[in-house]
């Protein structure tokens, strides 16, 4: 299976255009980040890939197939999983029901025990109501939930937001492990320090387009450059 | 044989049994309503009509040869009906979901409520045209005739079958939804359908099937009911509000609660018939009120995540259409010349209903509470005004004020009971409470039942202005309307109104700023009831009658319809809505029994095509035009506001 | 008022909150000194937000007492506590989306004036609040945007607006739940500066995961873990405490 390739992706909220032709590649097994200021269009890009943004055009190729025009449920079954920015934990479900909600779409997902080892809080609170979890626990649950499904491409929107530093490090470790296992990850991050330690490549997004591409080496050498992009 | 309080065991057990049978139907029906509410967030008001379809379906199958002579169709009996009809009714449900219900999932509850009320009116209206009020007979199937003698009473086989089969169906449904993965999918899909789809689940299809299933249950209940009750177009209408009350008592969204409560209440109702027959129609609503005081979430309801207030105001506060002073003058002048253009009676009807709709808009549009029982305030005020004027000889102004006082009192009481709830729950509670008043009026001697209080004297205003003169009466009503209109404008644009607005926007935040939000909502609700009472009392004097129609739930639905057609939360919307609705009713009055169908279609069309209402749409258009002009004259476009979620 | 207010604005004793047998906060004693910035940190699920909810009475404690300025407030209602001068911000920004920026602030200013139940007065009686509205908006840099609807503001500005609204109540004690979460680098700077600025003459208790913000702002830090106080003291002490490193900060790879 090949990776994800996005060509001239445009997207609209009603009449207002939020994406003005995004172009980027994520090869299989890579970790790639989208960086950019608040409102640059990172979340919108993920939603457009997932089919949650209905009004979109251009090309989103995954496994050779163009996903533009497909419904979200179809796209999910092709092996793409999405962890939204606002976490999307279901209040009417228990923690465990939340965890088991996404159907398994392929083999190779993470085993339940591994997930519980990774996120002990979740194991402990498995019978509580989903939204009774603390903010950070909800974030963990949102990530844990999509690791089970066997999707090969993970879209993670600011997964470290609101997490304790020690957990942020753990998530970093998880993403690295996922990469070793052959998962492909497209990550949206504001925490540049965190992103720079993980990603093979960074795309800087501004006004709904990619304005620069940085390799891991670029960033290591020139942390300033990336910081500058994120300043106002 | 021993007797209990002079009541023979035969009678007692007989009534309990009848109660239990009713309870089985309550349970099956409220189960469907609870599923559709819990999973789809739709208050399925057509459920009664769908139940009626089930009963008629059975009857049709039985009479196939008579209905289609010459085709050589067989007459299909009860057992066929038991299988085919729920499927067919379910399929009709699926089509209705596809065509109508689906379009309101993302909208406020008010639209779903009005839509399903409209659909119910269309369906029941059509059957009414075809069959009138007369009931059709459906025989008990041969294999279930007879019965068993329990010693103390005779238990007919068919009733036994209904009890066993009904309860089994309920339990099987409960199991499927609470104990399998399906329930989790459904609950998740109601919260955030997009995300569930992004996990790979075909949510639209799932919701359609769920709706179809709930409706199918109603169809099944209809088939089972056919041999017991009369098969008539009205059979669903009389049960649906009771069902809503059952769902409220059981606890919104609780499947097991709906089943258990349905059975219990059926039996309690049966017992009440034995000991206190007059109270049997109201006992369920009284129980609901008591339960709400002690357990606001219902007997089995979980304390739900606080639903946000309905946020559907379409007003643009700075537009010219929201300038109250200006429009008070314009309406005053327009109102003054109106009786020279149309019959004063017609004008007065518009003014009374416009005031009523404005009062409703105060709580619905400006506070965001979906009240659905304003008929209680309108009607009770009408009755009190009529009674005090006719029987006690109160002067006109005092009679109206007595009505207003009564409406205010009832409003404060109902508000106190309901205010802690929001959304559809609030709607169902206010509806059921209003129904209590309705049933009271049917039975109380002073209201004269079906006849109502007639020949109310118009009297003399302040003792010397003769109101039997049409123009005198008209200008009095106009004055009352303008006072009410001005009062509402003042309330909305007062420091108090600002707080109401903040509550509508974000209640937890308002609390954290130190506002006791329930108290604000209660005051607003009471003010709204008071003004609705002013409209109702005035109406009783104008038309010289107070009748059950004033208290009937359709009056509450009309208030909602007028507000929606005109534009929720706008200053002029309710007035425009009243003009449209009253004109429509006048034009369609000649249609006879079709009138319900036409009116129901109006509800449906309004929800589908006129969501922002006339005034809301106009305000949008004006704002867009102003914006274009500003850009044309060189101004920068205003930033597009990001969509507000949750 | 039997006890003198002393130097502590908040004194929590043995504060405990259980949810169905699970103790989210258990036996916490915590003093907050008047006119200090006090940070509450700890792993996810440590009970920080719950602790806030207990102080603001959104939740009723299972056990323990809370004193505010020496007075027992354990059994008061949330609105009452807010009127006493304890005001909080939320973990997710809480604004009135379809009111203008100025109206957002004004609704908070209006509360102490006691006119809020007057449905018979014109809202123009509120115009004497306008100058204070502008002052507050100016303080958070939102004055140029005063007539925009709040929904259209960028996320960082929404947080600033929320802060301005909160400040309008002249709170003696300000509770901030993750004031910088979800913000980009620049906005974090702005909000931190703002917090320092508003800390004059009042007390701030904040939850924050961004340690550099905590290090810069907080006079004292309490680390919660599993509902209990794990460590307490100035940043330099706490951040080197091995238990805190293990439970919260983590080894820096
Ligand atoms: N539901 C919506 N309706 C209209 N416009 C929207 C909506 N959601 C986002 N936008 C607009 O689209 C643009 C891109 O937003 P997006 O959420 O993708 O940004 P982002 O890069 O993810 O920012 P953040 O770092 O704040 O999450 C912004 O200008 C935003 O205002
Ligand atoms: N209403 C509730 N019912 C049941 N459990 C709850 C409830 N509220 C919180 N909890 C649990 O109590 C614990 C403490 O939650 P709290 O929200 O206080 O954590 P926190 O310290 O704020 O964490 P974070 O940094 O992730 O926001 C968590 O384990 C959470 O799951
Ligand atoms: Mg985003
Ligand atoms: Mg928290």
Image: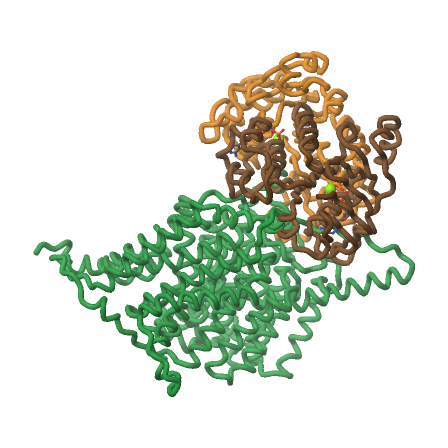
Chain colours: A brown, B green, C orange
For the N terminus of chain C, the image quarter is: top right
Percent coordinates x, y for residue C141 in the rendering: 82, 38
Q: Is residue C122 above or below residue A106?
A: below
Question: Is residue B219 visible from the viewing direction of this image?
Answer: yes
Percent coordinates x, y for residue A58 in the rendering: 79, 54
For the C terminus of chain C, the image quarter is: top right
Q: Who is closer to the viewer here, B107 or B140? A: B140
Percent coordinates x, y for residue B603 in the rendering: 56, 70
Q: Is residue C6 above or below residue A102?
A: above
Q: For the point 70% across and 71% down, which residue is it?
A: B330
Question: Looking at this rendering, what residue extends furthest in the right direction?
Answer: B634
Q: Who is closer to the viewer here, B47 or B631? A: B47
Q: Is residue C91 above or below residue B114?
A: above
- Tell me if A13 is positioned left or right of B264 in this view: right
Percent coordinates x, y for residue C95 in the rendering: 68, 43
Q: For the point 45% across and 53% down, which residue is it?
A: B413
- Count all numbered tags in the image, as a single digit: 0
Q: Who is closer to the viewer here, B199 or C50? A: B199
Residue B22: quarter of image: bottom left
């Amino acid at each position: 299976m090949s990776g994800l390739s996005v060509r001239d992706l445009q997207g609209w909220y009603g009449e207002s255009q939020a994406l003005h032709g995004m172009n980027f590649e994520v090869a299989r097994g890579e970790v790639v980040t989208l960086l950019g200021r608040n409102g640059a269009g990172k979340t919108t890009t993920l939603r457009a890939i997932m089919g949650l943004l209905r009004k979109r055009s251009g090309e989103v190729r995954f496994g050779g197939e163009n996903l533009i025009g497909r419904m979200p449920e179809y796209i999910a079954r092709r092996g793409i999983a999405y962890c939204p920015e606002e976490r999307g934990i279901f209040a009417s479900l228990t923690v465990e029901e939340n965890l088991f909600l996404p159907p398994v779409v392929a083999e190779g997902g993470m085993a339940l025990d591994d997930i519980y080892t990774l996120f002990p809080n979740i194991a402990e609170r498995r019978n509580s109501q989903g939204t009774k979890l603390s903010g950070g626990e909800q974030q963990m649950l949102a990530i844990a939930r999509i690791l089970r499904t066997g999707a090969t491409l993970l879209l993670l929107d600011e997964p470290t937001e609101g997490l304790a530093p020690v957990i942020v490090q753990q998530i970093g470790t998880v993403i690295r492990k996922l990469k070793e296992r052959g998962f492909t990850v497209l990550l949206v991050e504001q925490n540049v320090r965190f992103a720079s330690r993980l990603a093979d490549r960074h795309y800087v997004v501004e006004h709904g387009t990619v304005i620069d591409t940085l390799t891991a080496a670029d960033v290591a050498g020139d942390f300033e450059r990336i910081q500058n992009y994120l300043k106002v | 044989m021993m007797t209990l309080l002079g009541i023979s065991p035969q009678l007692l057990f007989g009534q309990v049994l009848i109660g239990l049978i009713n309870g089985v139907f309550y349970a099956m029906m409220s189960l469907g309503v609870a599923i559709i509410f819990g999973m789809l967030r739709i208050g399925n008001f057509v459920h009664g009509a769908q139940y009626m379809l089930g009963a008629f379906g059975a009857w049709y199958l039985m009479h196939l040869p008579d209905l289609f002579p010459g085709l050589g169709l067989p007459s299909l009996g009860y057992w066929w009906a038991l299988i085919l009809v729920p499927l067919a009714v379910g399929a009709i449900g699926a089509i209705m979901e596809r065509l109508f219900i689906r379009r309101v999932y993302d909208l406020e509850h008010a639209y779903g409520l009005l839509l399903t009320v409209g659909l119910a009116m269309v369906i029941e209206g059509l059957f009414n045209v075809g069959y009138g009020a007369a009931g059709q007979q459906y025989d008990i199937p041969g294999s279930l005739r007879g019965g068993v003698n329990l010693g103390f009473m005779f238990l007919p086989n068919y009733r036994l079958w209904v009890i066993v089969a009904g309860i089994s169906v309920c339990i099987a449904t409960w199991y499927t939804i609470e104990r399998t993965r399906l329930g989790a999918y459904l609950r998740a899909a109601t919260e955030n359908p997009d995300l569930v789809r992004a996990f790979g689940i075909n949510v639209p299809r799932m919701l359609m099937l769920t709706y179809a299933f709930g409706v199918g249950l109603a169809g099944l209940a209809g088939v089972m009911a056919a041999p017991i009750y009369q098969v008539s177009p009205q059979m669903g209408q009389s049960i649906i509000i009771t069902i809503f009350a059952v769902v409220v008592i059981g606890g919104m969204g609780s499947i097991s609660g709906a089943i258990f409560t349905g059975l219990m209440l059926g039996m309690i109702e049966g017992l009440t018939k034995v000991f206190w027959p007059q109270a049997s129609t109201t006992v369920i609503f009284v129980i609901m009120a008591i339960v709400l005081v002690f357990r606001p979430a219902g007997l089995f309801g979980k304390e739900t995540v606080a639903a946000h207030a309905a946020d559907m105001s379409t007003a643009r506060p700075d537009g010219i259409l929201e300038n109250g002073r200006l429009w008070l003058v314009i309406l005053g002048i327009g109102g003054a010349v109106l009786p020279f253009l149309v019959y004063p009676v017609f004008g007065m009807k518009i003014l009374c209903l416009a005031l009523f709709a404005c009062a409703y808009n105060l709580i619905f549009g400006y506070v965001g509470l979906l009240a659905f029982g304003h008929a209680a305030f309108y009607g009770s005020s009408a009755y009190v005004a009529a009674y005090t004027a006719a029987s006690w000889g109160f002067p006109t102004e005092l009679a109206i004020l007595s009505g207003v006082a009564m409406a205010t009192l009832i409003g404060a009481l109902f508000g106190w009971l309901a205010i802690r709830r929001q959304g559809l729950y609030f709607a169902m509670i206010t509806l059921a409470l209003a129904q209590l008043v309705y049933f009271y009026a049917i039975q109380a001697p002073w209201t004269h039942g079906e006849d109502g209080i007639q020949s109310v004297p118009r009297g003399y205003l302040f003792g010397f202005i003769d109101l039997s003169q049409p123009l005198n009466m008209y200008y009095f009503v106009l004055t009352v309307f303008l006072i009410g209109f001005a009062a509402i404008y003042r309330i909305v644009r007062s420091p108090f109104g600002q707080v109401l607005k903040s509550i509508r926007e974000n209640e937890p935040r308002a609390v954290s700023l130190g506002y006791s939000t329930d108290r604000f909502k209660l005051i607003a609700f009471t003010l709204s009831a008071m003004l609705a009472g002013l409209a109702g009392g005035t109406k009783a004097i104008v038309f010289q009658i107070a009748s059950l129609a004033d208290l009937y739930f359709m009056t509450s639905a009309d208030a909602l319809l007028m507000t929606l057609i005109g534009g929720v939360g706008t200053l002029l919307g309710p007035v425009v809505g009243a003009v449209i609705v009253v004109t429509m009713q006048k034009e369609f009055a000649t249609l006879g029994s079709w009138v319900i169908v036409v009116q129901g279609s109006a509800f449906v069309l309004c929800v589908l095509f006129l969501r922002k209402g006339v005034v809301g749409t106009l305000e949008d258009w004006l704002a867009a035009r102003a914006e274009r002009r500003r850009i044309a004259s060189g101004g920068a476009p205003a930033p597009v506001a990001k969509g507000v979620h949750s | 008022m039997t006890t003198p207010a002393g130097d502590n604005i908040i004194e929590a004793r043995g504060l405990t909150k259980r949810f169905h047998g699970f103790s989210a906060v258990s036996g916490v004693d915590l003093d907050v000194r008047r006119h200090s910035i006090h940070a509450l940190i700890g792993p996810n699920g440590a009970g920080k937000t719950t602790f806030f909810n207990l102080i603001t009475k959104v939740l009723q404690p299972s056990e323990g007492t809370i004193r505010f300025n020496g007075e027992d407030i354990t059994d008061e209602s949330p609105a009452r506590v807010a009127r006493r001068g304890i005001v909080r911000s939320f973990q997710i920004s809480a604004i009135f989306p379809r009111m203008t920026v100025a109206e957002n602030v004004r609704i908070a200013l209006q509360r102490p004036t006691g006119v809020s139940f007057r449905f018979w007065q014109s809202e123009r009686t509120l115009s004497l609040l306008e100058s204070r509205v502008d002052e507050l908006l100016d303080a958070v840099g939102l004055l140029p945007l005063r007539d925009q609807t709040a929904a259209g503001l960028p996320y960082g500005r929404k947080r600033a607006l929320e802060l301005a609204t909160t400040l309008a109540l002249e709170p003696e004690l300000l509770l901030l739940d993750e004031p910088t979460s979800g913000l980009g680098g620049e906005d974090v700077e702005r909000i931190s500066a703002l917090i320092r600025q508003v800390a004059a003459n009042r007390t701030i208790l904040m939850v924050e995961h961004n340690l550099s913000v905590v290090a810069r702002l907080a006079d004292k830090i309490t680390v919660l873990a599993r509902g209990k106080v794990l460590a307490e003291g100035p940043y330099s002490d706490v951040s080197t405490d091995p238990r805190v490193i293990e439970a919260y900060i983590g080894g820096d790879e």
